[in-house]
């Protein structure tokens, strides 16, 4: 058993919802998520962003669902930090 | 997320809060001036039964409401579908299940309700003195004059609302819209009274 502690995602999103609402939506997925969002590139209708999420136990599927719900499209998982769960089993 | 927060999010996502506000003022104004016109028309036509005036005005108010809802829904649905299609092309993905798809389905309905309810509610408020008088309530002024005063008050308040949005003097803005209502009343009186 292992726990995902940090992920860095490359995401394409529409301009709306804005970066704050987008980050809040992802942060609301978990009780202790810390989200950092950086805008990498911007064009007329979309922006490419990098999202870094840290937490005690990150639920990747739920984050992916939150991104889709806000109209975003996950392009790649650029970085992952996984810890083995010493307390498990 | 509460229903109100959800509506706010959808309005922000589609950037349509200003459209809803504009529709509210434009159609609210339509409602107020239409009632003003009808009531002054009855006033200068000589004695008419109050229930007949109420029915005629209520008919017009309902027609304004239905027209507002249906016309805004049809046009906003088309606009939202077009905007969603453009965004889907830019994103190269299906956004039907996202907040954008949800907005394309619900925002036309919300804007249609604003567009239809604004003239309907304002018209009903203007008709209140007529209903009260018809129900036997004694008013300090004759009911048709009271309804005209309510119409003037509501057009003034619409101006105040516009002034606050624009960040200009609300008194000046309120007086501007009130003058438009007075001008309308004068024109109606001149063309129908003699």
Image (tube, rainbow, N blue to C red):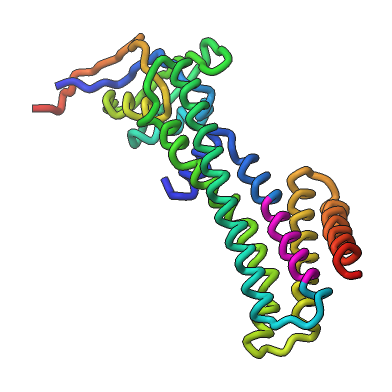
B6 sits left or right of B145 in the view: left
Q: Nearer the viewer, residue B176 or A65?
A: B176
Q: Which range of residues does the magenta coloring cover? A: B27-41
Answer with left or right where residue A4 lies relative to residue B26: left
Check the picture and name the quadrant holding the N terminus of chain B.
top left
Looking at the rendered structure, the number of numbered marks drawn on it comes to: 0
Instruction: Judge left or right: residue B13 versus residue B154.
Output: left
Q: Main secondary structure of the magenta part?
A: helix
Q: Is residue B28 magenta?
A: yes
Residue that appears at 52% across and 40% down: B74
Residue at 49% x, 49% y: name it: B4
Q: From the image, which quarter does the C terminus of chain B lie in?
A: bottom right
The residue positioned 28% from the left and 23% from the top of the image is A60
| Relative height, residue B30 to residue B105 (above, below) | below
Residue toward you, B189 or B181: B189
x and y percentages locating residue A73 in the rendered image:
39, 18
Counting from the top left corner in percent of width and height, residue A56 is at 29, 28
Q: Is residue A67 above or below residue B167?
A: above
Spot occupied by residue B109 in the image (x, y as percentages of width and height): 49, 46
Residue closest to the far left: A89
Residue B74 forms part of the magenta stretch: no
Q: Is residue B59 visible?
A: yes
In the image, residue A74 sits, relative to residue B83, either above or below, namely above
* Residue B171 seen from this side: no
- Where B86 sits versus B16, above or below? above
Residue at 65% in and 46% down: B23
Q: Quarter-wise, where is residue B151 in the image?
A: bottom right
Q: Position of residue B153 (x, y in %)?
A: 78, 66
- Which quadrant of the structure image shows residue B98? top left
Residue farthest to the front? B194
């Amino acid at each position: 058993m292992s726990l995902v502690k940090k992920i860095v995602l490359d995401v394409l999103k529409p301009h709306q919802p804005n970066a704050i609402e987008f980050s809040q939506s992802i942060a609301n997925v978990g009780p202790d998520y810390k989200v950092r969002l950086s805008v990498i590139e911007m064009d007329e209708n979309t922006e490419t962003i990098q999202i870094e999420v840290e937490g005690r136990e990150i639920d990747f599927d739920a984050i992916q669902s939150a991104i889709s719900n806000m109209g975003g499209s996950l392009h790649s998982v650029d970085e992952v930090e996984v810890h083995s769960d010493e307390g498990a089993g | 997320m509460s229903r109100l927060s959800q509506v706010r999010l959808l309005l922000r996502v589609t950037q349509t809060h200003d459209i809803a506000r504009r529709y509210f003022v434009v159609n609210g104004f339509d409602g107020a001036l239409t009632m003003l016109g009808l009531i002054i028309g009855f006033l200068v036509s000589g004695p008419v039964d109050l229930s007949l005036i109420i029915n005629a005005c209520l008919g017009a108010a309902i027609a304004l409401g239905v027209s507002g809802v249906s016309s805004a829904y049809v046009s906003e649905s088309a606009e939202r579908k077009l905007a969603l299609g453009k965004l889907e092309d830019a994103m190269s993905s299906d956004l039907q299940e996202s907040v954008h798809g949800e907005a394309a389905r619900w925002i036309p309905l919300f804007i249609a309700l604003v567009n239809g309810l604004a003239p309907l509610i304002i018209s009903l408020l203007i008709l209140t003195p007529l209903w009260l008088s018809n129900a036997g309530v004694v008013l300090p002024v004759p009911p048709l004059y009271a309804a005209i005063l309510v119409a003037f008050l509501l057009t003034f308040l619409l101006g105040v609302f516009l002034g606050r949005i624009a960040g200009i003097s609300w008194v000046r803005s309120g007086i501007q819209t009130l003058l438009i209502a007075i001008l309308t009343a004068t024109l109606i009186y001149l063309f129908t009274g003699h």
